[in-house]
Image (cartoon, rainbow, N blue to C red):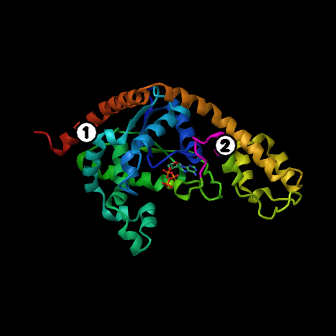
Amino acid sequence: MAKKRLVSGMRTTGSLHLGHLEGTLKNWVALQDTYDCYFFAAVWHAFTDRLKIDNLPEIIREMIVDWLSVGIDPEKAVIFRQSAMHEHAELSTILANCTPLGWLERCPTFKDAVRDDEARSGVSLGKLMYPVLMTADIAVYNAEAVPVGKDQLPHLELSREIIRRFNGTFGEILTEPEAVLSQVPLLIGIDKRKMSKSYNNGIDLRETPDGLKSKIQQMITDPQRVRRNDPGDPEVCTVYAYHKIYTPDRLEEIAQGCRTASLGCRDCKLMLFERLNAMLDPIRSRRAEIEARKGYIEEVLDAGEKRAHLVATEVMQNIRKVMGFLL
Ligand code: ATP
Ligand code: MG
């Protein structure tokens, strides 16, 4: 049986952190065996917050290198840049005309961005259009599946509505994608808020062992545990939240050690460092191998973009035909 086509992208806004690994990339690696995967660097989406992104070529290159070093396989998945695919832009321009303004204004991410008048003046049309471009990204490959977390379901529903509107006018031209719901854990940052570039609380995938150690040292533990002998409450501790993910085999022992003060925060952090470092080590070696191959990333993108074009060209040609662009 033919695999279903799945499309997913990641914005090129900066270096990747463990949140991206846990929340997105591990899922992508698992999906590439069951689906015909199209993974893209969402370069245009990155501009919706700011028009100028310093070092964009490096950001794109490092992102692709990181995808490959965590196990995204260019033999299985089609890897490409949104910005190399003018078809996304063409379809987005078209789909903008079957998207009611109200749908976009009611979108939770847009509503968050325009909280007050002052905020409103700093929000671009690009931000408002985000769901339209996202719909084009998906529809231009006739994707049948899109991986989403629960919080992103409204976005995909919006895409499905836009596609239904288009099809309502022109017939069953575009495919309505299904959500592939994934149980993505939300990883907290070293300050206990959601790990996010904007909060500057992340642990980067490219962290050196020393950098990693310093990030873990900065993690907030139980504030009641002032002295080494004070018993602590693991449930309020950031380090323990990480142990839940990375040290499941010794969790009881750690919780007990914290509550009885037989385990100090320093040793508890050291244990976490060892776990995380052991996880990052093979990623670091694969990254070094990939980076040693001159021209390899260009080759991967070139091949991926050729494959993506084969599909997008055909889909766009159908659209141009039914809409009457072709003489
Ligand atoms: P920004 O601060 O610019 O929003 P970010 O660090 O939050 O950046 P995004 O580009 O918003 O990163 O995230 C891309 C995708 O990575 C998200 O849709 C989500 O699936 C995943 N992701 C990001 N941060 C986390 C996190 N802390 N935990 C789990 N998944 C995450
Ligand atoms: Mg974010």
State the predominant SS element of the stretch in magenta. Answer: loop
For the C terminus, the image quarter is top left
What secondary structure is found at the residue carrying circle 2?
helix
The image position of residue 82, as x and y in percent, is 36, 42
Q: Is residue 257 left or right of residue 200?
A: right
The image position of residue 20, as x and y in percent, is 55, 45
Q: What residue sits 56% from the left and 56% below the top?
A: 200
- Distance, label 1 to label 2, CA atoms, is 50 Å
Question: Crowdedness of circle 1 by 10 Å Cα count: few (<14), some, many (20+)?
Answer: many
For the N terminus, the image quarter is top left
Judging by the rendered image, the residue that carries numbered circle 2 is 210
Q: What residue sits 45% from the left and 61% below the top?
A: 109
Disc 1 marks a residue whose amino acid type is Met
The image position of residue 89, as x and y in percent, is 28, 46
Point out the residue furthest to the bottom here. Answer: 117
> Mark 2 near ligand 1 (CB under 8 Å)?
no
Res 284 → quadrant: top right
Which sits in the foreground, 149 or 164?
A: 149
Rendered view: 174 above or below 288: below
Rendered view: 1 above or below 89: above
Range drawn in magenta: 202-211
Res 233 → quadrant: bottom right
What secondary structure is found at the residue carrying circle 1?
helix
Badges 1 and 2: C-beta atoms under 8 Å apart? Answer: no
The reply to whether residue 130 is in sight is yes
Q: What residue sits 71% from the left and 58% below the top?
A: 220
Judging by the rendered image, the residue that carries numbered circle 1 is 316
Question: Crowdedness of circle 2 by 10 Å Cα count: few (<14), some, many (20+)?
Answer: few
